[in-house]
Structures are given as structure tokens and as C-alpha cells.
Image (cartoon, helix red, strand yellow):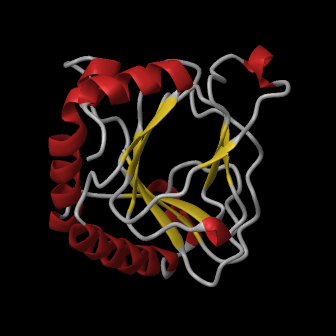
Amino acid sequence: MEAPASSLSATLERDGFAYGRGAALAASCERLRAHADEALARVLDLDLDAQRDLFGEIRTPLYRRDLKLSLAPAVTQVLCEVAQALGESLQAAVGAAANLCELSVISSDPGAEAQPTHCDTSYQGAPADVAIGRLVSEHSLLSLQPKSDFPAVLRDRPTELALLRTGDALLMDSRLWHRGGANKSRSRRSLLGE
């Protein structure tokens, strides 16, 4: 990881997001990506009623999915690595008694349109998204609007494109305004969402 916990916590507090570079090993992320792709293929073979409880809510569902994950070995390995690398920063951001509220893989297939700009919640939290594959400009991962936890500050706010290498984590205040970009690449974009 590139920055100490105090620096990550300060950046998260100041900008509403911070990067944890190399929070998980690339090999672990590759195993998780393969597991998630297999799980998604199995779920998509189910009828729509059976799928309902296996997906989270997502604002643009065509070609973009939020698949809930169980604690399979590939998932727990990446969680442990991220906790080891970023635990102090997460604890500083949300407190020692914070709970894991959601665990899913967010995938965007080629052809996915950009999401509208939105925040995930109206209360403070610090989800961590972990790239389980290399995310490059063609994927248009996320457009972030720093310091945008209140809608009044959105006017004339610059955006930052979050480009992540496999294993990089993005810590983000859940009130931060952002949007998933269109996937103009030929490959699936996947993030472990915690």
C-alpha cells in the first residue's frame, strides 16, 4: 500500500474518497474474478423470480449487475487482504464497531451505459471497492466528484476518473456523488463492493 493509514483517513475525510493501492494481491483478485464470473453465469441461467434476491439494486441494470456474494474462499481471501492493508484506515473512518453491510461484485459488461450521477446513501459510511481486474480508461470506471457530500456543492465541481490496477481499493464516503461510466471496452469490468 502506498500511503499510511493516517494519510488515507485524512484524504478520505478531505475529498470523500482515497485510494488504497495494492490492497489485495493480483492472484487473489483473479481467483475472485473467476469465482464471480462463474456465479454470475449460474444466476443468469435462473428464472427471473429466482434471480430477484441474488442481485442488489443498481440504477442502470442493463449490462450492469450487483451480484450478492457468499463468503466463499476466494471472497474471504480478498477480504482478509484488504482488511490487513486498510483496516486502520477503515477503522478511523467508520469506527471499530462498524459492520460489513453489503458484499457483492459489481460488474459492467461491454455496452453498459453510464449511470446518472448519484450518491449511494445519505448517511456517512466508507465502502471499499476493490478492482478484481485491471480497470483502464476504456472501462470508464467511476467519475468521482471530490468533496461532494452535499448536493449544493455539485455545481462546477470537477470530476476525477478512478483508474485502478488489479488489487487497488477505492475507499469512498457513501454520500459522495459519483457515477459508473459507460463500458466501451470489450471486457467485463468488475469490482468487489464491501
4 or 12: which is nearer to us? 4
Front residue of 7 and 105: 7
148 over 177 or under it: above or below: above
Whether 131 is drawn above or below 88: the answer is below
Identity of the residue furthest to the right in this view: 155
Q: Residue placed at 42% from the left, 70% from the top?
A: 133
Q: Position of residue 47 (x, y in %)?
A: 54, 75
- The front one of 55 and 25 is 25
Residue 56 visible, this angle: yes
| Residue drawn at 59 percent across, 20 percent down | 122
Image quarter for residue 88?
A: top left
Q: Is residue 125 visible?
A: no
Q: Position of residue 108 (x, y in %)?
A: 59, 67
Relative image position of residue 105 (x, y in whole percent): 42, 59
The answer to whether residue 180 is above or below residue 74 is above
Give the side of residue 191 with respect to residue 167, left or right.
right
x 44%, y 26%: residue: 11
Q: Quadrant of residue 163?
A: bottom right
User: In the displayed structure, does residue 34 sit left or right of residue 161?
Assistant: left
The quarter of the rendered structure image containing the C terminus is: top left
Number of disc labels = 0
Tell me residue 41's x, y (percent). Answer: 45, 81
